[in-house]
Amino acid sequence: MYQYDSIDRQLVDERVSQFRDQVERRIAGEITEDEFKPLRLMNGLYLQLHAYMLRVAIPYGILSSGQLRQLAYIAERFDRGYGHFTTRQNIQFNWPKLVETPDILAALAEVDMHAIQTSGNCIRNTTTDQFAGAAADEHADARIYAEMIRQWSTLHPEFSFLPRKFKIALNGAATDRAAVKVHDIGLNLVQDEKDGLGFEVVVGGGLGRTPVIGKIIRGYLPEADLLSYLEAILRVYNLLGRRDNKYKARIKILVNETGVEEFTRLVEAEWQGIKDGPLRLPQAEIDRIRDHFAAPAFEDCEDRVAYPDEADFNRWLDSNVSAHKQTGYAIVTISVKPTGGIPGDMTAAQMRAVADLSDRYSFGEIRVAHEQNLVLPHVRKDRLYVVWRALNDIDLGAANVGLIGDIIACPGLDYCALANARSIPVAQEISRRFNDIARQHDVGALSLNISGCINACGHHHVANIGILGVDKRGEEYYQVTLGGRADQRAAIGQIVGRAFSANEIADAVETIVETYLSERAADESFIDTYSRIGQDPFKEALYGTD
């Protein structure tokens, strides 16, 4: 994984010192809250319903064991003993005291971490496949290019005050695990027979109140031209993006109103003037960064392992363990979704335990998935049973990854000032309703995401079953969408009918699942059944024939 250099450390240390002075002036009343707001947001500090919230950057979702232990320390020392992993592969602390936030940033800096660009109208944390560098279906390691983008975009003087926040995602595998088609810019690594490694460039995707699947504006971009082409896109957006209306300020609106052909022409014209300049990546620099992501010292070990014949363990193998490119190794996804738990929440004790497991069994490396789970990317197959037992001991052994119990949920009205409804209690109730892990495996692959408002932080639009909290005459109701997906065949789910009350929504989900089970063909997933039969059978089951 990438290691900070002296420039990184100087930048982060100076930011901590600056923010300490800003906080002291705010507490002393020398600056108002309106004056302080843009300063705190530049350091990832939000003011939520009940307290401040600090969002910490985890660049492209990679943590060392030492960094995870430091996050555990921060959770205990400065918060209420837990942290919340997000769909941006970051972590949030929900209860920090303002006076202590500079100390938190200083503690982060000790382990090469920060909260820069986790808020504000800038280029946010670039995300990628949580299996990058390990997955058997990978044709290129996207982490290398995510690191290049991190270095290029951090405090970029031209792009620190964009019309709106901006999100980039990369994928280097046959399966899109990074949801690239619903980002402002999505990059798929492709291999051209003649020209070698490059990128398919997708622009104008996004969720929120106007969900859009991104459009391909370039089928092949040479590897060396990555940063100059991104610069061209951002320049066009920065110049033409709406600044008079934040709801129409995202690049997806610009692409739609300009038209994809004209937008592409503008980008290409801008790129021609800068493509041969200093942003063109020399091979030596690409190789230098690639060296930071060299494979760990894998051992020679058997690929075929005899495991104990335990049903629960076998289910965990089926759902939580993925194929590794290295013989004898596997990728373990740790479900941060125990039955009745809060999706993405992890205690300090659990963080320390996972850090210890990563040291013993995964070369001290942990990944954060945008599904709000953690990953041990390099585990010997002959140690999987021991890892599973250890995870069960800390309530993180749920065999539900990719199943209905693997719910994505935003904090909702329990924390967020923007939310219309609570997400957490709904997630907990649905989790308890489907607590039978054997039943979850019988239902099979099914994504269920919950957002507490139209901003869609829970990514409900791209779930097979999406739930959106809405305010209906002062009461919390939940609108259901069906048919969304975030993979290489990305699609926006469609509203199925009237919203359900808080007391009805778990029953509605149960009805949807039972309808699927009654309609599915042999070995057919929920999304494939839905694609085949459409909404009508589900609507009839939910609302009757009226």
Image (cartoon, rainbow, N blue to C red):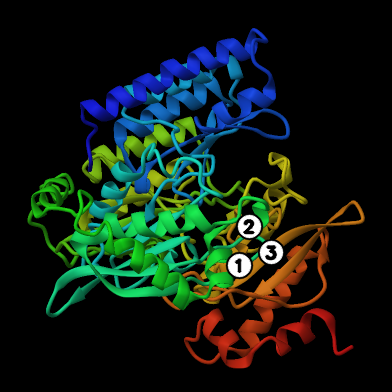
Q: CA distance from mark 3 to mark 1?
A: 14 Å
**Above or below — where is 109 with respect to 243?**
above
Between discs 2 and 1, the one toward the N terminus: 1
Residue furthest to the top: 28
Q: Which residue is mark 2?
A: 456
Proximity of marks 2 and 1: CB atoms separated by less than 8 Å: yes
Q: Residues within 10 Å of mark 1 (few under 14, many from 20)?
A: many
Q: Residue at x 60, y 78 (%)?
A: 483
Q: Quadrant of the C terminus?
A: bottom right
Q: Residue at x 64, y 45 (%)?
A: 411
Q: Which residue is mark 1?
A: 211
- For marks 3 and 1, give the one nearer the viewer: 1
Q: Is 512 situated left or right of 105 in this image?
A: right
- For marks 2 and 1, give the one nearer the viewer: 1
Between residue 149 and residue 238, name the one nearer to us: 238
Kind of residue at badge 1: Pro
Kind of residue at badge 3: Ile
Q: CA distance from mark 2 to mark 3?
A: 10 Å
Kind of residue at badge 2: Ala
Q: Residue at x 51, y 47 (%)?
A: 162
Residue 399 location in percent, x, y?
Answer: 46, 59
Residue 58 location in percent, x, y?
Answer: 39, 41
Between residue 347 and residue 202, name the one nearer to us: 202
**Count of number-bearing discs:** 3
Proximity of marks 2 and 3: CB atoms separated by less than 8 Å: no
Q: Which mark is residue 467?
A: 3
Q: Is 84 situated left or right of 433 in this image?
A: left
